[in-house]
Image (tube, rainbow, N blue to C red):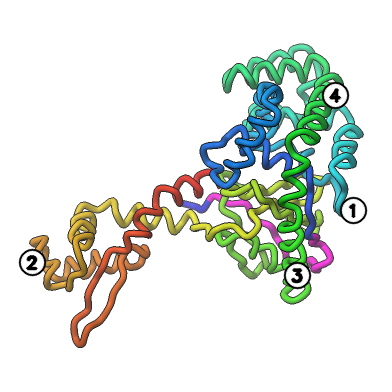
Amino acid sequence: MARVAVTVILEGASRERCAVQVSPLAELCAGLHALAEAGHHPASRDWIASVAGRAPDLLGQAAAWAPLWGSLRARYFFPLDAAGERELSAELDAIAALPVRDFAAMSAEAILDRDGSLPYDRVLDDAGTRARFAEHAGRFSPVRHALAARLVADPAECRAGLLTFLHEFGKRAFTDEWHRVRPGLREDVERRRAELRRRGLGVIAGVTATAEERHEPHRVVFDKLYQAMARLGDAPCVLLPSAHVGPHLVVKHARGLPIVIQYAAAGPRETPFDEVNKRLRALSDPGRMLLSRALLRGRRTTVDLARYTGMSEPQVSRHLRRLREAGLVRTSREGRLVFYELDTAAVRAIGPDLISALWR
């Protein structure tokens, strides 16, 4: 099965094509996503609780706008150019300055969650297209239907309402959090900038353990749930560290706009999807499951395992090799004897790693 990934082509581009910076709007978007999907953002739990206590009246409004920062965040929440860092108010002004059709297209793409059955840039073309868009959004959820209907009925009013909410939420529920996380994000920025000067565009692969840097052509491959390609020669790249985006990695690529990669700053090690898949496949075999149960009860040699399970020693050796390749079994030696032991931490981590890889 071919790997599903987003590939950023670096070939022929200089390090000047890459910038590392902070973005309060992108971080606000990450926080709002965590608020909407609290179950898979445990690192944001304290902040989410503080929002509920500080601005409970804004929670309903946040839920109504939530499709815009769902699994596919609207593109206008991220830098629209590579001109450098801005304050939150200036980034919100950039949304206000977007042509209405661009705002509608970016919103429509997020509402439909990359469902390409309708052209996002044409949702305002005529009454029939507007009605089909709203109806299609309704197949996802009533919330998406209501937001889609509001968008096509009056996109300027919809944008004004969104900006009013973002200004109010930013002031009451996000400003203190931004002041708290910004120093750590700035440290990450300076570290990545130094790495960019030292090793060049390879810094792009370094923002997540699940990315692979490859050559011929020089490129970086990111685990994602869709297939896409972007070229650094066509658009600059902006790297944005985040305190709230994990376990996700956000990669934005649209014609005429910078490539934006928002990543978890100083987060825990991410397990590549291929590694999680290898573990699941290793444990899918009944023989290897039986060996794992035996090893959970204590370390054993190949001979011991053959006696315990009734398998032949060559069978046991083949199964153990697969378990070792998947990182599920450790070995130790005492004289001439090799002992095998189940890595219980690796087995226990399969659940959280799987959820993280799927969300990525």
Q: Amino acid at mark 1?
A: Ala
Q: Position of residue 180 (x, y in %)?
A: 73, 50
Disc 4 + disc 2, Cβ < 8 Å: no
Q: Report the residue marked by disc 2.
A: 307
Residue 83 is marked as 1
How far apart are labels 3 and 4 at the CA level?
39 Å
Q: Report the residue marked by disc 4.
A: 160
Please rate how many residues cluster around mark 2, counting C-alpha atoms within 10 Å: few if below 14, some from 14 to 19, many from 20: few
Q: Amino acid at mark 3?
A: Leu
**What residue is shown at x 62% (from left), y 31% (from top)?**
115
First of labels 3, 2 by sequence position: 3
First of labels 3, 4 by sequence position: 4
Task: Please indicate whether residue 358 sits to the left or right of residue 34 in the image.
Answer: left
Disc 4 on helix, strand or loop?
helix
Q: Report the residue marked by disc 3.
A: 196
Quadrant of res 345: bottom left
Image height check: is 38 above or below 160?
A: below
